[in-house]
Image: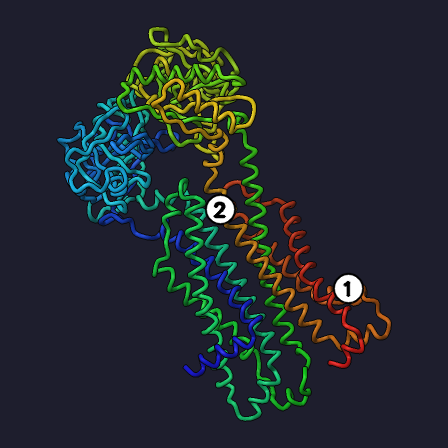
Amino acid sequence: MRELFLAWRRLALWRGTGLVALVSLGVGCAAVLAVAAVFHHVLVADLPFANGDRLVAVTEVNADGRAMPMAGPNFVDLQARHGGIESLAGYGGDTASVYFDSGTRKLGSYGVTPRFFETLGVVPQGRALTPDLDKAQVAWVSERVWREALGNRATLDGARLTVWDMTLDVVGVIPDELAFPADAQVWFPMGLFGEQRSRTAHNFDAIGRLAAGVTPAQARSDADAIGRVLAKEHAGDIDLASFGIVGLKEDLGARAKPVLWALLFAASLLLAAAAGNVANLALARHLARGHELAVRAALGAARSRLLRGALAEGVCLGLAAAVVGVAAALATLRLFGSMVGAQLPGIADAALQIQTVLPCIALTVLLAIGAYALPMLRGRDDPAASLAEGGARGGPGRASLRLRRGLLAVQIALATVLVAATLLLGRSFAGLLDVDPGFDPSGNVMAEVVLPPEFATERRAQVYERIRESLSTLPDVEAAGLANALPLSGNGANGQFLVEDGKNTTGYAEYRAVSAGYFAAMGMPLREGRDIATTDVAGQPHVAVISRRVARDTFPNGDAIGQRIQYGNMDGDKTAITIVGIVDDVRERGLDRPASATVYVAAAQRGATVREPGFVVRGQGAAAALAQRVVQAVLAVEPAAQASVRPVASLIGDSLALRRFTLQLFAALCGAALALALVGIYSLAAYMVRERQRELAVRLSLGASPASIRRLVLAQGAATQIGGVVAGLVLFAGGARWLSSLVTGIGVHDVSGYLVTAAVLGSCVLLASLVPARRATRVPPMAALRHV
């Protein structure tokens, strides 16, 4: 304890050096802790469900290898024939307006099959979901909804809600930590949607619980065999080739996994750079204390005693840095929640766990101990020789200088890797912003309109059409329309359609119900044929507009216009639909994914899926003014409605949330590593100027110009700095392919990116070295000689 007390005192005496070392190591520790917390939560931590390792995600797979949601009959057959799946459950839904006596809320609302909670191992508080409730007007809510919307009521008797025109009795409460999917707040029986008979209507997702001892690979093999049998039994009526089965934990983390690996690697580089900075500072301090340590050694202090003192300083610094790191990591995780909480709830829910905190603290302390022990272990100095150098200041020694330069080169190399990665990630992100989404997101806004629950379906459709007409006639409005799901929103169904050509030709596409004016409002150019018109209403021949990809894939002869298709698996209406137009492809599922094949039917003719449409309005003037006029127009048509408006461009922003989050974190890590490298460069340059002060003073007194002195100071560290940059670029080039495999869009051979990285590092290095170089020329030669 005495050694630790004395170590604290020594660190306090060197406040500047100690503070820089503390902040450096604390920042590195915080970066690793924060990223490790997210990594552990998303990819490592057990699911909160009982025996969560036995839960799997189940999909259908077509002949092209594309994963698809489940179709009702295929789900039933898999459930009946697969002995390795103990229970299978389906769920499907979306964010919807849910009406309570206390008001209306937008909540994740899901229809689920009877064994859903059983499969998860969740026991609701209240009534369980059993097969006899498959079509009952009942619902389960999360604890949060029970508290906030139902007033924490002691009993559920009389508790009701309305969602999608269904008034349901609340019969159970689900603990918040067991809510699934992550955004779910309301659950109700899927049977309320009606019986699903089509084998090509992929309308819901599925999870399963494997029997004890069955692995996902074994389950997948058995499911493949069942899929092949079903494909033969129902040839012509099914697009299923096999089933996909993967661990639920793996499936939930699949999207974030590559990004988190890249961030963990980057955070580790920052911690390594911080450790290098601390080692460099410790070595500089050791050299400054050279005379003191030599006196202590000459007076009989054993080398082991001196080493214990250095180790104690390392322990003190490491523990202090760990405290700073934990506090900073907690603040960083809260910042994560505010940045991406809405778009990436899995990341926003991350918290520090003992499994990640203790190893990181131990690593931080070990790095600090190593940094402070390194000067003591680098060699055995002769106390008599050190004292013979004089009292004030001896030379730094070539070995010490080489070590400091080596540590600095490592710091610069690590900073170079992070700068290069950040620049290329930024280019990738900018490239996505330049990708044509298939619509024009400028000059238009979208509106969500919520109508009172007592409005019947027919009245609701009439009000929506009146709102659309009112929006179309607003001053300076060019077009207005609605759709059951907007691009990049993550909503909307897809499935197989049948071409009525006598050849059983089929196609696969996204299904959207849109009104007249929708394409113009979205900025989607019509390429052939005509648009959906206001005359395309119930009682008239059903029409559709298709995307170019549908025309290309399903009608390669260019004869799509006039063809008739049947899409009854989407909305239960088997009325033939005539193709009347072709529009550009739209990237429905993400800017980094191929444009989707999409069929747009007339909402006025096939409104079964238009429960809560999204309105789009294109107009002139500022977006805020246009949004205000939209809200006023909605309320003028229906005063009881609620409307929220935002720019259509926000759809693109939301779809890039994970990419933006990744880039922001890389930029923060890059900035921190660069700052540490600059501190190291400045420290070494200042130290070398101080050690060569007599020589520089002599040069100045003999007539050397200040400019020549500055060049000399800059040149003495140039080799180290250039070597660090080159080494960093080589390291990044070796790992760029790995990074590109984790994050799509990274250019492995982007020469300009390497040149920009070198320019950025070169500028920073020059800036950090220039201050000591200028200072070296501002001290009068006689004053410098007098104090040397």
Going from the N terminus, do you reach mark 1 or mark 2 first? 2
The x and y percentages for residue 168 are: 20, 29
- Asked which quadrant contains residue 704, the reply is bottom right
Mark number for residue 191? none
Image label count: 2
Q: Residue at x 15, y 31 (%)?
A: 133
Place of residue 642 in the rendered image (x, y in percent of width and height, measured from the top left)? 37, 26
Tag 2, which secondary structure? helix
Eyeballing the image, is 212 above or below 136? below
From this view, report whether residue 677 is shown above or below residue 8: above
Residue 181 lies left or right of residue 415; in this view the side is: left
Residue extending farthest top:
540
Work out whether residue 722 or residue 359 is closer to the camera in this orientation and state it: 359
Amino acid tagged 1: Arg
Q: Which mark is residue 662?
A: 2
On residue 711, which mark appears? 1
- Quarter that holds the N terminus: bottom left
In which quadrant is the C terminus drawn? bottom right
Depth check, front residue: 447 or 354: 447
Q: Secondary structure at mark 1?
A: helix
Residue 372 x, y percent position in the rendering: 52, 74
Q: Position of residue 183 (x, y in %)?
A: 33, 39
The residue carrying pointer 1 sits among few (fewer than 14), some (14 to 19) or many (20 or more) residues within 10 Å by Cα, namely few
